[in-house]
Amino acid sequence: MSRISKEEVKHVANLARLAITEEEATTFTKQLDDIITYAEQLNELDTTGVEPTTHVLDLKNVMRKDEPKKWISQDDALKNAPDKQDGQFKVPSVLE
Amino acid sequence: MSLFDYTLRELQEKLHNKEISVTDLVEESYNRIEEVDEEVQAFITLNKEAAKKQAAELDQERGNDDAKLFGLPIGVKDNIVTKGLRTTAGSQILSNLDDPLYDATVVNKLNDAKSVTIGKLNMDEFAMGSSNENSSYAAARNPWNTDYVPGGSSGGSAAAVAAGEVPYSLGSDTGGSIRQPAAYCGVVGLKPTYGRVSRFGLIAFASSLDQIGPITRSVEDNAFLLETIAGHDKMDSTSANVEVPKYTESLTGDVKGMKIGVPKEYLSEGVSEEVKEAVKAALKEYEKMGATWEEVSLPHSKYALSTYYLISSSEASANLARFDGVRYGKRAEDAKNMLDMFMRSRAEGFGDEVKRRIMLGTFALSSGYYDAYYKKAQQVRTLIKNDFEKVFEDYDVIIGPTTPTPAFKVGDKVDDPMTMYANDILTIPVNLAGVPGISIPCGFSGDGLPIGLQIIGKHFDEGTVYRAAHAFEQATDYHKQRPSLGGAR
């Protein structure tokens, strides 16, 4: 049984904001299915009660004083922008 | 012979004694690049004009040359942000990022130490790959035989050092991306303990696994460079507030009484006979030097690959969401609306491997699958980490091969993601456990390709890893071999 259908691949691509063609959807479905099927070997292991590791070090939230400081200027922040206007990033209209 | 056959400290002595100038070193780099890089393709972007200018300036200050890396030319992997110097991470989506706004913390440290940045090194796109064939520019080649891959993702960083284009470089390692190319190219590459080196300014792939580390021609140079780049950084809250020792002082050559664990899983089927023989010969060398070794077990090793792909792809799917064509990078033209602009900018800007991993990660994190895939992988990560901790209760270091085979041919694995992934099976567990690991040259295959020995240590115990690596290097001369590319130098 396949682990992921072509429809699910298209849905995931949409969630990830990736435009994919019909042909790509077919290829990715096969490849992702292979990877997920392989990854299901983890189900051989009983992990009841095992704490998940999100980070290897015992890290705590680090707080610092909220003080303003010089970092990147507005001009600098905009200089690599694909499109800008009046000191702001410009994007295509949200609605058609 | 090349100037870069000297160690970094020897080069500094020559600079200090005015036998050579910084300009000589920088020219040595660019001349060699001119000579071989069309074939090796180690660099994506060169910093020629600025580097030559900086060299001339440093030559004026030579009475005042006590900065740690004074005048030494370095190559930097292209996922490490350099202010004003194009940074692409090997991706088309950043192909126009010609003027980055800030320096990564490691680059600040290099600048403070007065090294000279020669250029930005080739890599698999966003560090996703094991052969450099996922670079969206040109695939870098192995200097030992350019029909073969240099490994990845830091393929350019390892190839440039092996080819004598720079004496040392920086790479990054998420699942083996420093150690595997170091093994394939016959150089020394260390992945430090997670948190040892600041990740600020490293373009994130998988934030809980990524580490920047040095690639060099000798263990001594490697330790010397780590001393410079390691340490706590207030810009990276995952960098550890643990004192940085003088790693070069741990290079005593003495491993008498050192206890080595050799995981049976690392010498199992799937590892080629040539690689096994080279590792066994290395263990004999350690015995001669007074160390002892015993077989140990890391029983969850076979689950590391699955665990890694689920965790790293999940983290990548979140990290790469920032590339949307709004603030920097490439934007698709003539978009109908904003959503169309996002979808097409990303479709045009990312290569297939990056798309595959973003989709895998998005799937693993999506509602209904999160517990079955992502959480499960994090639980297995705990088991893998515990395996290492258990062995380290009784042993000082773990030794095995870096990779199951020497380098493979360009094009051999490009069509099958799963076989490509299997290359990293011996390096991935080290990232999952967060411990340090080094690859050093330990022999050559029948085809004349380098073989790497992996030495793994306890958290923040790079000193012992370096001591073990250095002692082996002193007893052998594999690290002194050079590829004959463009005429041996």
Image (cartoon, coloured by chain):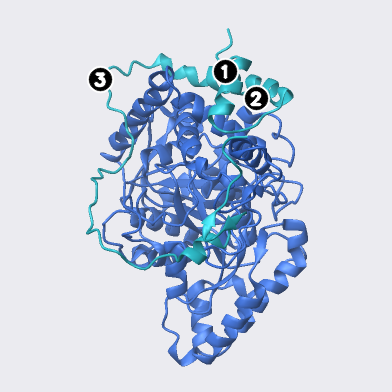
Chain colours: A cyan, B blue
Where does the image place residue B265, in percent across and percent down from the top left?
46, 29
Give the number of the disc on residue A8. 1
Residue picked out by circle 2: A28
Residue drawn 60% across and 70% down? Answer: B5
In primary-sequence order, the first of circles 1 and 2 is 1
Q: Does residue B220 lie above or below A53 as drawn?
A: below
Choose top left, top right, bottom left or bottom right for residue B161.
Answer: bottom right
Disc 2 chain ID? A
Q: Secondary structure at mark 1?
A: helix
Q: Three-letter amino acid code at disc 3?
A: Gly
Query: Is residue B233 shown to the viewer in this render?
Result: yes
Q: Three-letter amino acid code at disc 2?
A: Phe
Crowd band around label 1 with a 10 angstrom C-alpha radius: few (<14), some (14–19), many (20+): some
- Of discs 2 and 3, which sits in the foreground? 2
Crowd band around label 2 with a 10 angstrom C-alpha radius: few (<14), some (14–19), many (20+): many
In primary-sequence order, the first of circles 2 and 3 is 2
- Of discs 3 and 1, which sits in the foreground? 1
Q: Secondary structure at mark 2?
A: helix
B41 left or right of B85 in image? right
Closer to us: B487 or B353? B353
Give the number of the disc on residue B459. none
Give the Cα distance between marks 1 and 2: 11 Å
Closer to us: B203 or B177? B203
Disc 3 chain ID? A
Q: Are marks 2 and 3 on the same chain?
A: yes
Residue picked out by circle 3: A49
Where does the image place residue B207, in percent across and percent down from the top left?
42, 44
